Image: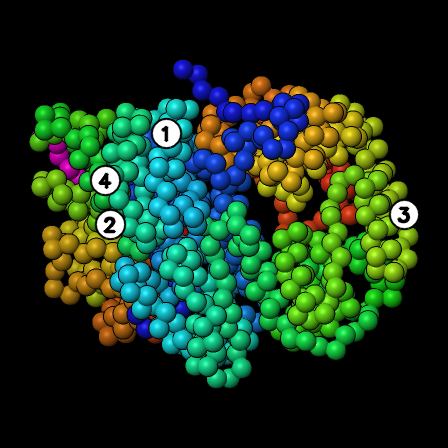
Amino acid sequence: MARTAVRYTAGQIAKLGKDNIPSELLSGQGLVYSSPATLAYNSPGAEGFGVKRAGLAVPESVMLIVSPGCCGRNTSIVSSMPEYKDRFFYLLMDETDLVTGRHLKRIPDAVCEVVSFLEGQKGKKPKVVMICITCVDALLGTDMERVCNACEKALGDGTRVRPCYMYALTREGRRPPMVHVRQTLYSLLEPLEKDPKSVNIIGNFAPLEDGELQKFLTKAGVKHIRQISTCGTYEEFLKMASANFNIVTNPEARASAHDMSSRLGIPYIELTRSHNVEMTSLMYKSFANAAGIDIDVSAEESEAAEAVRSLKEHFPDLVFNIGECLNADPFELALSLARYGFGVDEIYATLAPEKFKYVAKLAEISPDTKIYCNMDPTMLYYDVSASRAHISLGKDAAYYCPDIPNVVWNSDVQPFGFQGIRDLMNRIRETMKEVRA
Amino acid sequence: MKGLRKVLTPFAPDQSGAVSVLYGLGGMIVIIDAGGCTGNICGFDEPRWHNARSAVFSAGLRDMDAILGRDKLLVSKIASACSRIDASFVALVGTPVPATIATDYKALKRMIENETSIPVLTIATDGMKLYDEGEAMAYKALFDEFAKEDGKLEELTLGKTPLSFGDGHKDNTLDDYKNLGEGTRLIAASSSGIEAARLLGKPCEIYSSAAGEMAGSVPSGNVLVCHDEVFGKTLRDRGIACDIATFFTLHDDVRKEGDRKITEEDEFTELVRNGGYDVIVADECLKPLAEDFGGTWIDAPFFALSGRR
């Protein structure tokens, strides 16, 4: 029997409604296919900024991974990056540990030995030790706060020890690992006197692209714009507690912002990345009103609009396939591209109910856009030959569409705002020009 | 301290070993995990994943599935996939999660076979053992399910997986296991091959082609080989007098005086410091553990150890 990958059109999904999204498109409904997107997304420590790398976002921190050996296996990829050298350590659990929980008693000694090793042999004492634990301790119900307190007591020198939960089991829970790790990082901040000219941008672990948002803030009189990734020292990181307000650029940082609001008295404003020029303009206007500052976006808005116009002029009939391993919401990006008059043939992404609004609108413009779920087992049989796309966007889309040009758009540094739209459009135009030259 | 790693990253675990044996045999491999273990295996330990799509799936377990022991849900997920995927068998590969909740693999096997009429192999790996043990467990599951007494296969190489041999691996087919018989000549290319032959109760030839190729470039002297035991034995069989140290299994078939199984980083450091060796043949990821060593280091890449191809 000929096997095919399961897919639905935007029109079909819109007709079914938000409460009846087909199970094949949802997360947590079946076995999970090993596609590039699921390996990155389904495995909180696998690549990109998973829990392990994210847990080391605080400057001068190191991590002790307390787990069965399998959980730390792929860390050698990250360990080989110069900025992570001598920052990962492991306390391997065996079967007796699993049954008796005796490994917990060894953690304080292990932490002391790691700190002593770094101080003695490497000449650099860490300011923070993150203890990363995994599914096993999630199921054992380990009280990590207590373990970390015992570690701090054993060290007795002010070095902070915090837990970091790499619990893939809780991915669809209220506090999934990537939400939790952000809360852990910012929980290190202690109350400081407020600096009215200080603002934090929180959301990602690599910096937001240095550009328009920072420029708007500077023009509005902000002197210090801090992001966790641009803090060179632990002391600089601690100054994030003096911010007048937080700007949240990723919904996964919302819980941290909420914590900082109640614990440190720092209010927050959430900005949503969009690839629609008009929506981005509205976002900045709302932001300016909420923050009580003046922002003139006209120059940046014109540049973004011009980049869209130029792409449209050069490649008026361009058709896209879009994956989810990219710095964009694939459904929002598809909708924006369709609104600009481009074609969107296929999307490879998990359709969370909160994304239904984009699909419903997409169905009005492009009802035949096909939506596949990266997680569905039938993606084993995905065949790109029926696709009419000229270019794909996203790392996973390159995997599915190896014979058409691809824009990966997946860097650690996060694009944002008009600048993000402009740069993406220009990158697509350049890629297509090269291919057709 | 026991279990503490300050220099090395963890070695390839048993579950990666199991998948390396089962990969490409035409079965549906279901890793009983939440997703992280599958990410480690496909995204790191299994180079064949990058070249061709294969039916390797995560069970996608969530906390309440594990806490409540929702085996029926897992069976229905697998049955649903079996109705949409062609598979000659289903292999359940264990991880720390089923080890923690004491999953009853025998019951799962029976339930899935009743539901799908497809043979089910169960490999109770737990992520805490090493890859060679997982490979041996997978071989045993294949032998138990498919091997026949009257098979006519002439020769079968065991243990030549990417984890031991990198790009030089040799893949078997499912028919190889189905045609395995009394007269089949077994070649153990790494430690798991010796164990697999032992499980079958058959003798085997112990030979590593990677070591065979390297033999001519090892200078004479007091030599330490820290690698897989078959790698060391092959060098020894080629006339290189050496001690064998291994982080993996060391069988009595190989062990000679001076050989040892090591577990901790410090043990390797002490061995080099006190052994008086002139030559070390080992993956260079071990070099930082032997900073005092002033002799000749012959790099012998070992993916299961360093993750380096």
The amino acid type found where label 2 is placed reads: Glu
How far is disc 4 from disc 3 in space, using C-alphas?
A: 67 Å
For discs 4 and 3, the disc positioned in front in the rendered view: 4
Nearest the eye: B140 or B268: B140
Is the magenta region chiefly helix, strand or loop? strand
Callout 1–callout 4 Cβ contact below 8 Å: no
* A400 on left or right of B72: right
Mark 4 belongs to which amino acid?
Lys
Answer with mark 1 or mark 4, whichever residue precedes in sequence: 1
Upstream in the sequence, badge 1 or badge 2? 1
Work out how far the residue at label 2 is from the one at label 3, CA to CA, in angstroms.
63 Å
Write the start and end of the magenta stretch as one range.
B183-188
Residue type, numbered disc 1? Ala
Comparing labels 1 and 3, the label whose residue is closer to the camera = 1
Report whether B143 appears left or right of A49.
left
Query: Disc 2 marks which residue?
Result: B133
Identify whether A414 is placed above or below A311: below
Residue A364 on image: x %, y %? 74, 25
Q: Which chain contains the residue that carries disc 1? A: B
For the residues carrying marks 1 and 2, which lies nearer the camera in this image? 1
Classify 10 Å Cα crowding around label 3: few (below 14), some (14-19), many (20 and above). few
Q: Which mark is residue A299?
A: 3
Q: Position of A65 compared to A203: left or right?
A: left
Q: Which residue is mark 1?
A: B79
Question: Are labels 1 and 2 on one chain?
Answer: yes
